[in-house]
Amino acid sequence: MASLVEAQTPADEWLVIETTYHSSYGCYRGRRWSRAERICQDLVRAVGPFETREAAVEAAGGVRDSNEMFDDDEAGRYAGEPPWDSADASNYDNDDEVRVEVKTVAAHEAQLRDDEQHMAEASVLRP
């Protein structure tokens, strides 16, 4: 029987996912983005991989702390574990917001496949 360490695959590893996305306020006030628009416009950065969730959570804190969108945290809204979203600060002047979350490599890859499938279906429906 293989040990847990030997049985670990890259899919069992963890990533920090930092997503910068357009808000629906600021210069985009009132705009509702479709999923296809979000997929095309969001800037997604993966940091890692990390062998443990705990290591990824620690790294996520560093990603959050190095991003100016999370500077105004006097209310402690970004305490605790991720996910963290700068939109929680309710700064309606922001044109963009940032979300920091921790996912397994497998979950991130599944999301990418789902997004790709959505875009393929959207392009078929487009005249």
Image (spheres, rainbow, N blue to C red):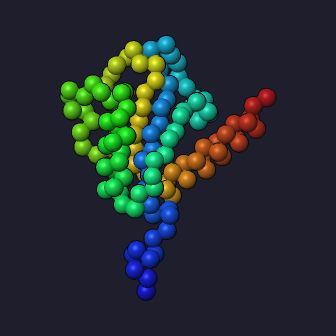
Residue at 71% of width from left, 42% of height from top?
A: 120
Query: How many marks overall?
Result: 0
Split into 4 quadrants, where in the image is the C terminus?
A: top right
Q: Above or below — where is 18 with respect to 73?
A: below
Locate residue 119: give its quadrant. top right
Give the residue drawn at x 45%, y 70%. Answer: 8
Where residue 95 sits in the image (x, y, percent)?
46, 19
Residue 11 percent location from the top left of the image: 50, 62
Residue drawn at (33%, 42%), measured in percent from left and top?
62
- Viewer-nearest residue: 115 or 20: 20
Among all residues in the image, which is located at the extreme right? 127
- Figure quadrant of the N terminus: bottom left
Q: Residue at x 76, y 38 (%)?
A: 124
Left or right: residue 56 compared with residue 18: left
Residue 52, by quadrant, is: bottom left
Q: Where 64 sits versus 127, above or below?
A: below
Q: Which quarter of the picture shows residue 100?
A: top left
Q: In this rendered view, identify the residue nearer to me: 13 or 116.
A: 13
* Residue 35 visible here: no
Position of residue 115 in the picture relative to residue 44 (left or right): right
| Residue 127 is at least partly visible in this image | yes
59 to 125, vertically: above or below? below
Q: Residue furthest left?
A: 75
Q: Position of residue 17 (x, y in %)?
A: 45, 44
